[in-house]
Amino acid sequence: MITTATLEKLEILSDAAKYDASCASSYTQNSKYSSIRPFNSSGICHTYTQDGRCVSLLKVLFTNKCTYNCTYCVNKVTNDVRRASFTSEELALLTHEFYRRNYISGLFLSSAVDKSPNYTQQNIYKTILLLRTKYSFKGYIHAKAIAGADLSLIQACGYLADRMSINIELPSRESLKLLAPQKSFEQILKPIDYISRQSRKFLPLHNISEKSRFLPGGQSTQMIIGASDDDDYQILRTSKYLYNKMNLSRVTYSAYIPVCDNSLLPSINTKIPLKRENRLYQADWLMRYYFFDAEELISAEEKNLDLNIDPKTNWALNNFNRFPIEINNADYKTLLRIPGIGRRSAANIVNLRNDVKIDFDVLKQMGVVLKRAKYFITASGKNISYKNCNPQDLRELFTDEKSFQLSFFNKGGVGYDNRI
Amino acid sequence: MIIEYENTFDGLLSALYTYYTCKDITIINSSSMPGLLEADKHETNFENAKKFGNRIINKFGIAAYENIYFAFIYNATDKESSIIQYINFLVNKNNNNNMAYFKITKYRKEILNTIMRFQGFLRFSDIYGIMYAKYEPEYDITFLLSDYFKERLLGSDFIIHDLKRDLLLFYKNQEKVIIKINKEIFADYDDTNEQYIQNLFKTYFESASIKERENYKLQRNMFPLKYRHHALEFKKDNTNIF
């Protein structure tokens, strides 16, 4: 039942869940219960909050009563905050009511670890079971797997949800030990590994109906940026491992917002590393959609990504001898490596060049960022700007382009671009 | 010769049919420049319209047909000539007139973006068991949207009200009806339960934002002010949105 107390609970528990970015997308290729497809292939944004982030799911914690004491977390047991818990019935009904009014596309359900991991996981399971059965909920469900819960419970949730996630939070064993002593890397990796093995069982060979599929949206995770000393090289290496070995659908990066004062953490006045988060998302995108390898983008000596220049342009300038690239005959993967050409432009070029000879006018029409791309391409052997430029000058040019970076920054939504 | 067709999609297809069977014709629609040009009225011939539509689909695929429809509802002043140029481009791709192609692609993108936005931004309220939403879109996309909401609202009856064009789409028992209506309906509907759920959502909207990352510019880019009029979370007072 929705009561007058629900309002306060919702306020507390959505406030507590908002730092979790691992739910960024609400769209799966094979959504379980629903045949509806949005017109584009990404999730639907129902509204945008004051920080410009997309709201597509009802993102709440089941409870914020926590037994853990992770240094970086607002909900840690020693923190003095208002505490509340939903009941399964209440939360299921609330989600249903929001969903049918088109406020949200689904539910993102996380939880603090109340009593024990198993107890917490059971509450999550009860809620999504109610939703799927009693309310025949056809929306998207993203549920948290709680590290340390029984694998059978996690499996049961997996048959109801579209995606699950366990947050790694810290990319290395050492920093986890330091900041979250009650958790261990093994404890977190165990369910991730289990889910990835379960999902693999149901890959294409098996002729299983959509409904009974295990987690059609796969699993995701989140890492906090800037709470520990870990550098970008380590973070991207961890991501690469997760994508390649654990088959993750998505790794999200969340710039650390100082919420607690602690000697182990950056001081409470530290600036939020938004730019760094943005660069990591760019690098992540390059790894997933542009066929870049983590080591190409960053080397162990460099440690961190260059904040002044985006990783793709940086790579192009470091490998300037590979350019210029001839637009009319380069293959798709090569086109993708040109700064200023994205996935859509690259696909357009490949599709159109059989019929139409591509020149700079056509590229402009397509929406290629010529301002940037013109230094790296030729069209039918011709080029306006490539001659007489060298990587050093270009680097300076792109670094000085403040306005360009700003617009890029805004467009990417500080990494919360939901259009995957 | 100039012919003036009734400003509907069937009217356009039927006029295009005539255009491609007779020579030396200019097509204009009934809402453009009334009375300025001396034009013959073109009676919509549904059979010809269907024939022409099918020919486009068979020859160039469903996407081309969609593109023509999108260009039609985009409602640019020169839509007839761009559509004709586009069809000519499809017939002969080497005629170097790819500008029409890009123009149509732009229209398509624009329309799809608008639809995509309203898939999220439309807010329904439960009124006497019927889901009711009103909005003011730039383009006439109510019909296209209704296909989506038919599935989304799990078969319940719904109304989508386009206040800009005074069109009201009513979906009941698997059937869609579009009527013209020039006043707001349910203006004085009041229900405490509905009100409470709207308040819950407002609360959620407020508390889901991270204060430290505030970025109103980004919010405005993603959710332009022109769409906010009917989005309940941007209403400052507690008045309901029916």
Image: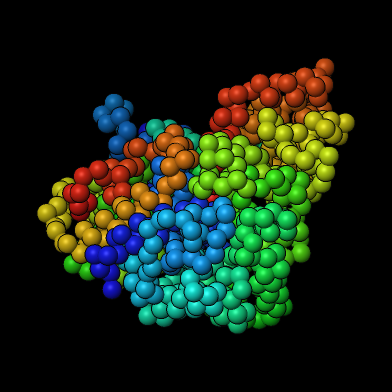
Classify residue A357 as left or right of residue B171: right
- Name the residue nearer the viewer: B18 or A40: A40
Can see residue B64?
A: no
State the residue at coordinates (62%, 48%). A264
Q: Residue sitting at 30 percent across and 29 percent down?
A: B33
x, y percent for residue A279: 66, 40
Residue A370 picture quarter: top right
**Residue B71 placed where, x, y %?**
45, 42
Instruction: Give the camera-side residue of A132 and B37.
Output: A132
Q: Is residue A313 left or right of residue A134?
A: right
Percent position of residue A353, x then y: 72, 41
> Hey, which quadrant is residue A402 in on the image?
top right
Q: Please tell me which residue is depicted at 37% across the width and 35% down the height of the picture.
A: B28
- Which quarter of the rendered picture does the N terminus of chain A lie within? bottom left
**Residue drawn at point x = 56 percent, y = 47 percent:** A262
Is B39 rendered above or below residue A141? above
Q: Is residue B203 above or below residue A212?
A: above
Work out whether residue B21 or residue A19 is closer to the camera in this orientation and state it.
A19
Q: Classify residue A321 as left or right of residue B60.
A: right
Residue A74 vertical position relative to residue A280 in the rendered view, above or below? below
